[in-house]
Image (spheres, helix red, strand yellow):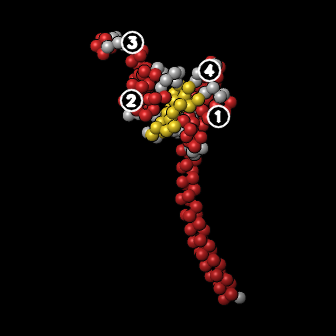
Amino acid sequence: MSLAELQNRTIRPEKIAAVSEFREKMGRASGIYLTDNLGLSVEHMTELRRECFKNQVDFMIIKNTFSRMVLKEKGFEDILKHLDGPTAIAIGYEDAAAPARILDKFISTHDRLKVKGIIFDGKVLPASEITAIKDLPTREQALSGLVGAIYGPVQGFYNVINAVLRDFVSVVDQIATKKQG
């Protein structure tokens, strides 16, 4: 099809809506995982979608043509080579590693699902990095660790100051008791 024919084509509104929705999701995404779902049964796909839904991860199948267009627009040309054959996309928003944990767990029981490529925090990574990504702490775990790292020394300082004051009061009390007696 020539460029002129393509430009004169009428594009159906539902396709425009699908591309717009995908573009919007890609704009908010922090972790994007391209998967090959060839050979998975409908039941297994439904199971995977449910698990994704429970963890605030979008799992969608979108035409490779649309995916190529949006990914190229966003500057991810390096991952376009993975858009061949049936491709499903898992998208994480708040926790970029959430899809990796879900997919890795699912792959351990369903070997037909394969990860083709990853976009993690704006960087294109090979599929083999999923094992490293899945072990990253969640946002809550990272914040908890940070608070613990900050709180530990402060608590230690508080305990030292408190001990000095407690010992001082104890000495003053002993002196007062001795003078009374």
User: From this viewpoint, which residue is outermost toward the left?
Assistant: 4
Q: Quadrant of residue 27?
A: top left
Judged by depth in the image, the label closer to the viewer, 2 or 1, is: 2
Residue 95: x, y in percent?
Answer: 52, 39
Q: Residue at left 56%, top 34%? A: 99
Q: Amino acid at mark 1?
A: Lys
First in sequence: mark 4 or mark 2? 4
First in sequence: mark 2 or mark 1? 2
Of the numbered discs in the image, which one, if any, rests on residue 105?
1
Q: Nearer the viewer, residue 17 or 10?
A: 10
First in sequence: mark 3 or mark 2? 3
C-alpha span from label 4 to label 2: 28 Å
Q: Nearer the viewer, residue 153 or 68?
A: 68
Q: Residue at left 60%, top 75%? A: 164
Tell me the residue that label 2 is attached to: 72
Q: Amino acid at mark 2?
A: Lys
Q: Amino acid at mark 3?
A: Arg
Residue 83: x, y in percent?
Answer: 47, 26
Residue 30: x, y in percent?
Answer: 47, 37
Tell me the residue that label 3 is attached to: 12
Circle 3 — which element?
A: loop
C-alpha span from label 2 to label 1: 30 Å
Residue 51: x, y in percent?
Answer: 61, 29
